[in-house]
Amino acid sequence: MVQPYPKFSQQFAYASSGSPMLRKAGGCLGDTTTDPVGATFEQVYNGHPFYVLWNDQFDGDPIHTKEAPTGHSKGMLAWNADGNGVVMQVSTPSWPGSGSTGHPRQTDGNTLGCVKDNDVLVSQHFFSLRLTKDDVLNVAKGLVNASVATDTTNPQIVNNGGPSEIQAVVQNLGKLSPSKSPINVMLSSGVRFISKPSKLEVPPWQMVSALLGGEPLRVASWWTRPEIPSTTAGMAPGCWDTSLGKPGDVEIATTGTWDLTPIGLQGMPEPDGNHAKVGVSTGTHPWAIFGDLNQQGSLEGKCDSSQNGRGGTFYVVENANLAESVRELLKGDRAPGLSESAQAAPRK
């Protein structure tokens, strides 16, 4: 229900497969069943699909907030009896906290704002993708690999069912994965899906660059202590796995531009803080990237620091218009880099 809300806004820009350039929308995100987030989530919440919701910051309802090495990941996976479904990756703490009207959330409901852990105090991102049965399986395996925070025994956030092979994978969610290997698969839509396990203790966006063949990236995330600086191509960090190859340039965006106006893209202070995790290729490929992990951690030394030691997922969308639109959004200042001489030799 709409309530008076003085702390910032849910105004939003959006893009779709039919219209891939980012553009400003009217109204507020998540307040209706016709805006992109509301329309997608309503089909799950008021429908009868099978679903999994996960969030490391549920704040006690329905599960306690989880720290490392649990995955720093948030979202919703839903599918029907045939196994076809949809995934929604979100960057918002605490939301969504219930997947069905039959199991409502008792504390904050499913609002994006007006909650203890204010989801719209800073900017966020939402990414949604239609999935085939094989895609659902691949994404579910990636969620297991990333050690996402959920509880398969709690019907408020997990309603397991449908094809037996999907059920078997979903049953393994909510546990810490022993994996040290990323998952890097192409989904039926042509969107690349990457899953980082917690035990792969490497800087996350350098990992993404390496898995994309050393593609240079510009990245905006919750960039605050312990900050990972911008890095240059050709040298892997000290905290690294040589099987990943070498990352390209990874440039940390600290400001961006929307409607000819500069915007903040770091962590706090509010209201210029950015909790979205968005990247874009600055090389030859038209890739826009939506992720779970912040550019926080370590290049060398304490390799399990912050996001290095947490799991997460990334979706790489190849679309020239979307990539150009995100590139314009992230155009601005950058974080300082680390000199080549300070980068340690690669180590497994």
Image: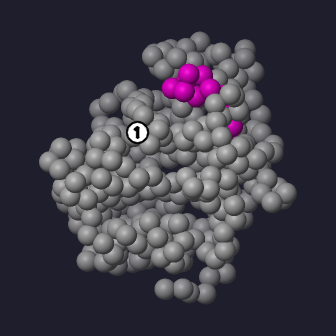
> Is residue 81 in sight in this rendering?
yes
255 displayed left or right of 168: right
Position in image of residue 265 (x %, y %):
71, 51
Residue 71's spot in the image, x, y percent?
Answer: 41, 45
Amino acid found under the numbered disc labelled 1 = Leu
Where in the figure is residue 173, as x and y percent of width and height?
27, 48
Vertical relation: 31 (above or below) 130: below
The front one of 68 and 113 is: 113
Closer-to-camera residue (20/169)? 20
Residue drawn at x 23%, y 66% is: 155
At 48% from the left and 15% from the top, the residue drawn is 242
Q: Is residue 65 above or below residue 280?
A: below
Which residue carries the number 1 mark?
A: 187
On-image quarter of the C terminus: top left
313 falls in the magenta region? no
Report the residue that reaches farthest toward the left: 164
Judge by depth and name the residue closer to the eye, 49 or 105. 49
Assign a secondary structure to mark 1: loop
Bounds of the magenta span? 209-220
